[in-house]
Each structure stands twice: as C-alpha cells, then as structure tokens.
C-alpha cells in the first residue's frame, strides 16, 4: 500500500486551511496524526502527494468537510464523565419548568442520548427538549440512526438498556438501537461553533460543550464560549470536558464542580 510523506511546509498549508474552514487549530505535534488520517484520501483520489491534496482542498468544499470529519473524530461513549450526569439528574429533578438542553458537540450521539435517558428518568417537568449539534455531517447521520455495537452496552446500566434500547436481529445482530420514541425527543442539526449561531437556536438551561474546545486556540475558544453563553439563560449550567477550563477567559461563570459551571445573572 502506497504511503505518502507530509512535508512540514505542506502541513503548514493544511493548518491554515483547517483554521480557515472550521476554526480548528492543528498544533505542530499533530503532524503525524494528520498524515495518518488523510493517507486514505490521497489514495482514494489518486493524488501523487499531500501538496496536491492541499491544492484540492482549496477548491472543494465537500473535501474540506471530509477532512474535517477525519481530523476531529473524538472518543465518545454513553455516560462519559458520569459525575456530570449525576449533576444533571439533580438539575432535572429540582426544576419546576421544562428544561431545554444543548449537546453542542454531540459527535455520534452517545452524549445527547445519555442526556435524554437522564431527563426521561429524572425530569420533574416532562416537556424537556434537547438540541444536538456537530460540525461533522457524517457523525450526525450516525447519531440520528442511534445504532451502536453491543460492546457499548457495558457503558449503560441494565435498567437503561431495558428501557431505552432495542437489540438488533437479522442484519442488525450485534447492534442495538436507541428506542425511537426517546430519539424523537432530540433535534439533530449541523452547526459550526466557530461561526455565528443560528438565529432560531433559542436559549438553554443546560449546555454540554465537552471535549471540543481542545481543538481551538485561546482566542477562538473565548469567542466560541462567549457566543455559546449568549444562548444560556442566567443561572443556567455549562459542562466542559475535564481536560478543558474557562480559567483566564474572563467569562461570567461560577464553578460548582469540576468542569461544571453556572452562568452568573
């Protein structure tokens, strides 16, 4: 199988292209990762090298989206960072009005489906809503389907599996599907957090924006969070990944638990 060399000057071109297309910053130490993940695109397109691929990216919006999808694949799982969902359980149980929630980087859907399971179990008011968004249209397609390998069943309790999941048969043996009745409570939509947010997005009581800010430099991270916080009601809750922080960004947030914040009034 043909292997391609990614020269430093061409990597710098890819850095600029990705920053312009998505706001995502690829640090220098990601050069090997970028090379490994994009090799198959060069072979599929029958291009002689990465310089030709960089030139092609400048002319093809579709290929830029494919590159973004390949370079932003995140680890995700049901009930990841479980303390956040314990806090969400308390928020849902205490609220005297229906809550709106946003999974702002939902990847393949495990996070918003977990949020929906928690809300279904714990919400004092049943009229809750969830919006789930992601930059990658391919992972959004997977999220909408809500179909996962049975190996991921271990990430959920037996009660959640029985109540909210359907075991596949026939061609879907070895997979399970999130119950469509629960899935219908989630609106999936494409969204680039580095751009102005849709005018019809509305405001939220709870926003999960976890494990995505690591892709942005400090200036972009501040702008994204400022934009996101405009959608969060005063007193609303913001959840980040545990490797992320708002320290030094000058945002109107109070820490209530690790990687968990409340918007000041």
Image (cartoon, grey):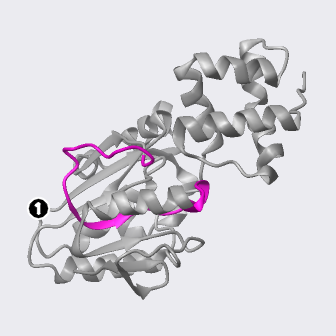
| Residue 237 falls left or right of residue 12 | left
- Which residue corresponds to mark 1? 127
Report the predominant secondary structure element of the magenta stretch.
Answer: loop
For the question of whether residue 48 can be seen, the reply is yes
- Which residue is drawn at the image coordinates 70% and 40% (left, top)? 15
- Which residue is drawn at the image coordinates 36% and 40% (left, top)? 144
x%, y% of residue 178?
36, 50
Q: Is residue 10 above or below residue 217?
A: above
Which image quadrant for residue 231? Answer: bottom left
- Which residue is drawn at the image coordinates 44% and 53% (left, top)? 105
Q: Nearer the viewer, residue 200 or 195?
A: 195
Q: Nearer the viewer, residue 109 or 4?
A: 4
Q: Is residue 257 above or below residue 245?
A: below
- Residue 119 among those drawn in magenta: no
x%, y% of residue 257?
44, 86
Range drawn in magenta: 193-218
Which element is circle 1 on? loop
Which image quadrant for residue 196? Answer: top left
Q: Badge 1: how crowded within 10 Å, few (<14), some, or many (20+)?
A: few
Q: Furthest-bottom residue in view? A: 256
For the question of whether residue 178 can be seen, the reply is no
| Residue 148 falls left or right of residue 31 | left
- Residue 196 among those drawn in magenta: yes
């Amino acid at each position: 199988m043909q292997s391609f060399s990614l020269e430093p000057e061409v990597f710098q071109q890819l850095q600029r292209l990705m920053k312009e297309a998505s706001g995502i910053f690829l640090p220098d130490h990601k050069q090997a990762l970028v090379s490994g993940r994009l090799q198959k695109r060069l072979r599929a397109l029958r291009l002689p090298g990465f310089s030709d691929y960089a030139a092609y990216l400048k002319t093809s919006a579709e290929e830029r989206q494919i590159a973004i999808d390949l370079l932003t694949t995140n680890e995700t799982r049901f009930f990841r960072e479980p303390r956040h969902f314990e806090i969400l359980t308390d928020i849902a149980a205490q609220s005297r009005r229906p809550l709106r929630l946003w999974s702002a980087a939902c990847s393949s859907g495990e996070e918003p489906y977990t949020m929906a399971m928690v809300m279904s179990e714990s919400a004092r008011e049943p009229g809750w809503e969830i919006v789930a968004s992601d930059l990658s249209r391919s992972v959004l397609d997977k999220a909408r389907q809500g179909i996962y390998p049975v190996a991921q069943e271990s990430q959920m309790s037996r009660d959640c599996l029985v109540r909210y999941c359907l075991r596949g048969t026939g061609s879907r043996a070895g997979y399970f599907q999130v119950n469509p009745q629960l899935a219908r409570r989630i609106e999936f939509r494409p969204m680039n957090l580095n751009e102005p947010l849709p005018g019809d997005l509305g405001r939220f009581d709870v926003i999960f924006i976890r494990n995505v800010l690591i892709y942005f430099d400090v200036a972009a991270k501040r702008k994204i969070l400022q934009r996101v916080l405009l959608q969060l009601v005063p007193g609303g809750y913001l959840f980040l990944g545990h490797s992320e922080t708002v320290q030094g960004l000058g945002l109107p947030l109070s820490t209530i638990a690790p990687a968990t914040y409340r918007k000041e009034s």
